Image (spheres, grey):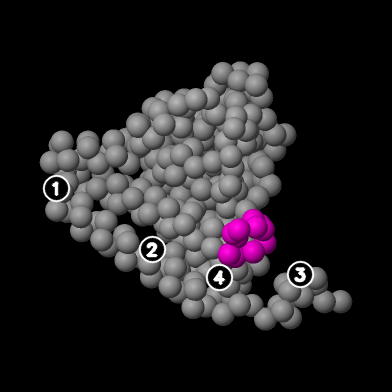
C-alpha cells in the first residue's frame, strides 16, 4: 500500500513539474516565436502521460544503479531522484544547474543519482551496456537501465547494444517507450515489426510487451526483469505501451494526429486512473491526496524560484570544460 502511494506521489510530482515547465516555456517567446528566447531557451520535450514507464521501472532501483534516458527525460530524472532545484536551474540555463547551464533539458547529467540523458536518438544504449559490464566485472549486484522511444529501436546502437549485452550476459534492462509516434511518424510506418519486444528473440533474451500504460503492470514486469539481471542472468527487453499527452515538442501543431486521438488518450490519463484505484482500495483518502498535491506544488514552486533567482553564467564560462589544455 505505502509503495503504491509513493509511486502515485512521484507520478503526480512529474506531472505538476512538467505542467509548470509548459507554462514557463512560453515566457518571452511571443508574439514572435524564437526558440532561443525566453526563460527556457532551446527545445522542450515533455512526457506527460508517460509517467508510469519511469515510475513503474525506477521504483525498483537503488541509488547506485544507472539510468540512461533520451531527449524526453524529466520523468526518468525525477523518478531516479535527481535534485529538482539543480535540474530546473539547468533547464533555465543557469550557473547553479547540474552542468552550470550548459546542457539544458536534453543533456542532464547527475553523478549523485547516476542519471544521464542525451538529445541523440539511441545514444543511451551503449553507455548503459558499459555500466552493466563494469558492474559485472566488479562483482556488484547493481543494474543499468536504458530508456528510449520506439523510434530509437530502429537505430544501430539498439541492436549493437542488445547483441553485446546478450553475448556478455551483463545486468542491463532495455526499456522502449511505445508512445506510437516517432516525432510525427506512426510506428506502423517506420517499424517492420508490430512489437519491438519480439526482437529480443533474435538475441536470445527475454522480451516483454506491457500494454495499457498501467503502472502496476509495469512495476510487476520490471521487478522480474531487474531481479533477473541482479542474479546474473543477463538482460531483458521491455516495451511499454504509453501515450504522449503533449506534442513531440512544445509548439508542435500535431497535424499528424487523427481526429479525436489526443482526446481519447486524455480520457485514459494514467494518473487519474491510478488515483481512482488507490481511492477505491482505500489506500488513499481524498484528504491525503490533497496533502500530497499541496506538498508537490510546494516542491515545484521552490525549484522554479531557485532557478529564477540563480545567476546567469558568465560569458567566459563558454570556453571552460570544452577544450583540453595543452
Picture layout, residue 98 above or below residue 119? below
Q: Mark 4 points at which residue?
A: 97
Sequence-earlier tag: 2 or 4: 4
Report the front residue among 281 and 325. Answer: 281
Q: Mark 3 points at which residue?
A: 322
Picture layout, residue 43 above or below residue 269? below
Specify whether residue 261 is in view.
Answer: yes
Q: Is 30 colored magenta in this rendering?
A: yes
Label 3 Cα crowd, 10 Å radius (few <14 / some 14-19 / many 20+): few
Place of residue 15 in the rendered image (x, y in percent of width and height, measured from the top left): 39, 50
Q: Which mark is residue 300?
A: 2
Tag 1 near tag 3, CB within 8 Å: no
Q: Which mark is residue 227?
A: none
Q: Which of marks 2 and 4 is in front?
A: 2
Report the front residue among 161 and 80. Answer: 80
* SS class, disc 1: loop
Sequence-earlier tag: 1 or 4: 4
In the current view of this chain or complex, which residue is farthest to the front?
31
Question: Gap between marks 2 and 4, in whole Å?
Answer: 16 Å
Question: Gap between marks 1 and 3, in whole Å?
Answer: 52 Å
Residue drawn at 55 percent across, 29 percent down: 257
Residue drawn at 13 percent across, 41 percent down: 282
Judged left or right of residue 216, residue 303 is right
Place of residue 69 in the rendered image (x, y in percent of width and height, measured from the top left): 56, 48
Q: Residue 285 carries which label?
A: 1
Residue drawn at 45 percent across, 74 percent down: 306
Picture layout, residue 34 above or below residue 158? below
Q: Give the range drawn in magenta.
A: 28-38
Q: Is 8 colored magenta in this rendering?
A: no
Image quadrant assignment for residue 198: top right
Magenta residues, dominant SS class? loop
Judged left or right of residue 250, residue 15 is left
Amino acid at each position: 500500500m505505502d509503495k503504491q502511494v509513493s509511486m502515485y506521489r512521484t507520478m503526480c510530482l512529474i506531472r505538476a513539474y512538467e505542467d509548470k515547465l509548459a507554462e514557463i516555456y512560453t515566457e518571452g517567446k511571443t508574439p514572435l516565436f524564437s526558440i532561443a528566447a525566453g526563460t527556457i531557451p532551446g527545445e522542450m520535450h515533455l512526457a506527460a502521460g508517460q509517467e508510469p514507464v519511469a515510475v513503474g521501472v525506477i521504483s525498483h532501483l537503488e541509488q547506485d544503479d544507472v539510468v540512461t534516458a533520451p531527449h524526453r527525460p524529466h520523468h526518468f530524472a525525477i523518478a531516479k531522484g535527481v535534485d529538482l532545484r539543480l535540474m530546473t536551474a539547468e533547464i533555465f540555463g543557469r550557473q547553479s544547474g547540474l552542468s552550470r547551464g550548459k546542457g539544458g533539458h536534453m543533456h542532464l547529467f547527475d553523478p549523485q543519482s547516476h542519471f544521464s540523458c542525451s538529445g541523440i536518438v539511441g545514444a543511451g544504449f551503449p553507455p548503459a551496456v558499459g555500466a552493466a559490464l563494469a558492474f559485472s566485472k566488479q562483482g556488484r549486484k547493481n543494474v543499468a537501465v536504458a530508456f528510449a522511444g520506439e523510434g530509437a529501436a530502429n537505430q544501430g546502437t539498439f541492436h549493437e547494444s542488445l547483441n553485446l549485452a546478450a553475448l556478455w550476459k551483463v545486468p542491463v534492462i532495455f526499456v522502449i517507450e511505445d508512445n506510437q509516434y516517432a516525432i510525427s511518424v506512426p510506428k506502423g510506418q517506420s517499424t517492420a515489426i508490430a512489437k519491438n519486444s519480439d526482437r529480443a528473440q533474435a538475441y536470445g533474451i527475454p522480451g516483454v510487451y506491457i500494454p495499457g500504460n498501467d503502472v502496476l503492470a509495469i512495476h510487476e514486469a520490471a521487478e522480474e526483469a531487474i531481479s533477473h539481471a541482479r542474479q546474473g542472468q543477463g538482460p531483458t527487453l521491455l516495451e511499454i505501451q504509453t501515450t504522449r499527452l503533449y506534442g513531440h515538442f512544445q509548439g508542435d501543431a500535431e497535424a499528424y494526429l487523427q481526429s479525436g486521438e489526443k482526446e481519447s488518450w486524455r480520457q485514459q490519463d494514467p494518473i487519474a486512473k491510478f488515483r481512482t484505484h488507490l481511492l477505491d482500495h482505500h489506500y488513499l483518502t481524498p484528504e491525503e491526496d490533497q496533502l500530497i498535491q499541496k506538498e508537490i506544488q510546494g516542491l515545484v514552486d521552490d525549484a522554479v524560484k531557485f532557478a529564477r533567482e540563480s545567476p546567469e553564467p558568465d560569458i567566459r564560462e563558454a570556453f571552460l570544460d570544452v577544450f583540453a589544455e595543452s
